[in-house]
Amino acid sequence: MSTPLVEAVETIEAPDIPDRPRRGWRSPSFVVGAALLLAILALALVSLVWSPYGLDHTDPTARLAGPSGQHWAGTDRLGRDQFTQLMLGARTAVWIGLASVAVAFAIGVPLGLLAAAAGRFVENAVVGVIDIVIAFPTLLLAMLLVTVYGASTGVAISAIGIGVSAEVARLTRISASRVFTEDYVLAARTCGTGPLMILARHVLPNIWHTLLVQATLAFGIAVIAEASLSYLGLGTPPPAPSWGRMLQEAQSTVSVAPWNVLLPGLAVAVTVVGVNLLGDGLREILDPQLRQQRQAADR
Amino acid sequence: MTVLETTGLTITLDGQPLVRDVSFGLAARDRVGLIGESGSGKSLTALALLGLLPPGMRTSGRILIDGQDHLGAPDRQWRRVRGRTVSIVFQEPLTALDPLMPVGRQIAGPLRLHQGLNRSDAERRAIEWCDRVHLPDPARLVRALPHELSGGQRQRVALAMALACRPRVLIADEPTTALDVTVQAQILTLLDELIEETGVGLLFISHDLPVVAGLARHLLVMRNGRLVESGLVDDVLRRPRSDYARQLVASAARVTRLARPNVRGEDR
Amino acid sequence: MLSYLIRRVAWLIGSLFVAGSAVFFLLRVLPGDPAVTLLAVGSSPDQIDAIRHQLGTDRPVLAQYGHWLGDLVTGNLGDSLFTQMPVLDQIAGRLPVTVPLALSAFVLSIVVAVPIGVFAAVRRRGLLGVAVSTLAQLGIALPIFWIGIVVVWLVAVQWRALPPGGFPRTGWQDPAAAVQSLVLPVATLTIAQGSVLVRYVRSATLDVLSQEYVRTARSLGYSLPRALWRHGPRNGAATVVQILGILLASSLLGTVVIESVFALPGLGSLLLTSVKARDLPIVQGTVFLMTATVLVVGLVVDIVQRLVDPRLGART
Ligand SMILES: Nc1ncnc2c1ncn2[C@@H]1O[C@H](COP(=O)(O)OP(=O)(O)OP(=O)(O)O)[C@@H](O)[C@H]1O
Ligand SMILES: [Mg+2]
């Protein structure tokens, strides 16, 4: 039965995302962040086709050599070229980072949406689980899994992914429930629009930019976590190179070859700073409301 | 004697003028109403008179307080007059008060700051002030937090805070807009009583002509950042010179006639 | 308040139960037989059976689960697979290193970072303010073990001012030596945690600064720093308490990495060596205790928040 009220309600539109998105280059954070990440990404991609030396190439005549034309970043105590290791480490970092973020979102987003869309009981249950997983640090989770399965790339990805998924679920739930209580969604529900339709038409379009920002930040968290795990010897096992293990090896020779410590640490920092800047920039570009709040806060 | 005077006050943001060439003066016992539509620059003018404009806004002109130009003065110089010579009451009493500080201490603060009172003396004076703004059971109420008071009571607290150090000019920026109509009338009565008692000069900002007309003797009308009209309330109401003031009066008259058939006759 | 307290404690007990179960099921029920993964390839069936018996995995899963929960309630975390010593004793033996390390880094980072964070907020447009927040950003981005290695290289290798790592065999019997060996670890943890704290405190302060009551205070003649001093602590407290909770938990976890950098015989290195040796009882006991600590800290945070902000209580 179509009543005038329902017709009137149906004409209530979801507000367009106000303001055209700001052009990317107008946000310095975005530009710098993207540049830093592109540099890391380039290292990783180039390593697929070319690196100064092979993965297992060792140069016994040049152990712990300083940076030179032959070895741009020096060599370690086995005579392995550090720049090669750095490039291949970038590949590991990017791969584990992306895969963990994918796992985190594959778990977190549906869970958060479920909590927001379902009734109070389900919501409370999910919130409880999220709280506990948040209290259950990624590092400990990884340690549990490594105890059972041994260190491997898959374990690292699962542990980091599950650890980060809790935060993703939390954020998804909060942003989605905010949309669910908006007038135009209530109006749509009154007209009998199904939950999946509401999700597709109203919720996702309104939260995707929050999630995108979260994804960039999660990538940074995953890269640090990967480096920590391999530093502790719980990450990707050798011979696959990793920034964390490079640092662990460099630590034992720090008194003779301190330069070996510099680059891998810098690589992690560049990735994380890049990700944070990119996230900040994306937020500015995608979320006009935040921009206004910032201006208001500057009073 | 003129306490507060501004000439040619202009406020710009990124080269855009928000307030242009505003001039007027205020002496003790003056009652000036400043009226204008939303966004016309009333609040910015008020903030400029206390040197509290948001950073990034630039001002030119003059702001004389007791004859001394304060525009562009260092914060140290402004602090000597804020709360002591010129005070302000803001529109939203809930956010203007610290939600976690007992209201008594909020009133006592400026007394301790400017008059060097010790805690217990200041607290006692705060209770006195609560009494003067007709808050019930002052001795107990001073210990309450803002969220435990009603909107009208909060605005009374804000008034007590502003007047505690006996300023000679009080700026009230839409102090009743956030309140419902009956409470609004009570606050206006209180304001009227307090300025009679203390002799404080009043700059009353509003976009509601009947409210301003009831309280002020002199009227300033602002539009798009400019003063378009200035004169005694009666003159402006009878012979508005600008188109805008004419519209204001006409629409206010229409509304008032609906509500109270012959309001002008019984007003003082 | 009392009913809130009861509800919150009940919630904590529920969470501990869930966390305990999670630890159990992650280790036992996931595919794979711990007894097999534990031993080297080619161990005899007898050896496998012996380990199974010791782990209790020869019994039905539910019986094991009940046993583990019962043990948790009575505070018994089992025995190490290799040293046969009670897990709880081993953990207790490591606390004299880990607790001072985590607590002093926690306290020190508050002392250092809170004023810096407030400063960075008040001077956010100034050169120094920007520099401070940039440094903090960097401190967050750099992995903590990298900071540790650099600190070791600088202080222990270059200046030879302090030992690069290790802890006196005699423990705290020689307090001077013990303190000396904790200086660099504490400093490293403080740099890392302090950077995080600076960012949090800065944004909490900015939040207070943007509030209208600060403008009110200024309109009454308070200078910006005095207005901040008048309103900041009480209004920032709830946020700061929450941050401190996170910080305390992450100080505890940070010790896992820090102890590895500085070769300290603490809880973290016990966990790490047990993970590598696959000493299941120790791993599950330590992980459970650490998680429980995080949950308890969360409880304390929630309660303190209620105390500092009466509005939170008024709403429920
Ligand atoms: N912090 C600010 N940043 C930028 N522009 C501002 C700011 N505050 C005010 N403005 C602009 O200055 C103009 C005047 O604002 P003002 O607040 O003085 O208006 P008003 O007359 O008080 O209006 P209302 O009746 O709504 O309070 C408006 O156009 C507003 O957009
Ligand atoms: Mg205004």
Image (spheres, coloured by chain):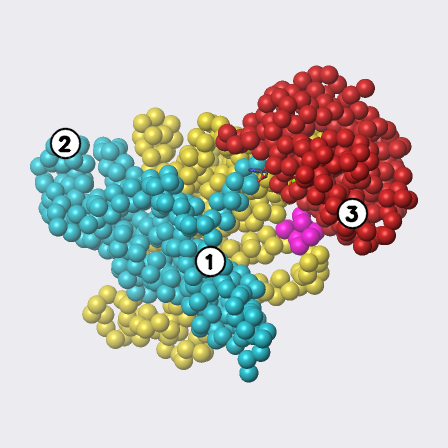
User: Horizontal placement of C178 versus B107: left or right?
Assistant: left
* Subunit ID for the residue under disc 3: B
Spot the cyan chain and give its letter. Answer: A
Give the colour in which the image draws chain B. Answer: red
Q: CA distance from mark 3 to mark 1?
A: 40 Å
Tell me which residue sits at (48%, 45%) in the image: A291
Near mark 1 (Cα within 10 A), the count class, few <14, some 14-19 or many ≥20, is: few
Query: Which residue corresponds to mark 3?
Result: B253
Give the colour in which the image draws chain C. Answer: yellow
Question: What is the three-letter code of the residue carrying label 3?
Answer: Ala
Q: Which mark is residue A16?
A: 1
Please determine whether, in this image, residue A124 is positioned above or below residue C256.
Answer: below
Asked if badges 1 and 2 are on one and the same chain, I answer yes
Tell me which residue sits at (72%, 26%) in the image: B24
Can residue B243 be seen in the rendering of this structure? yes
Quadrant of ligand 2 in image: top right
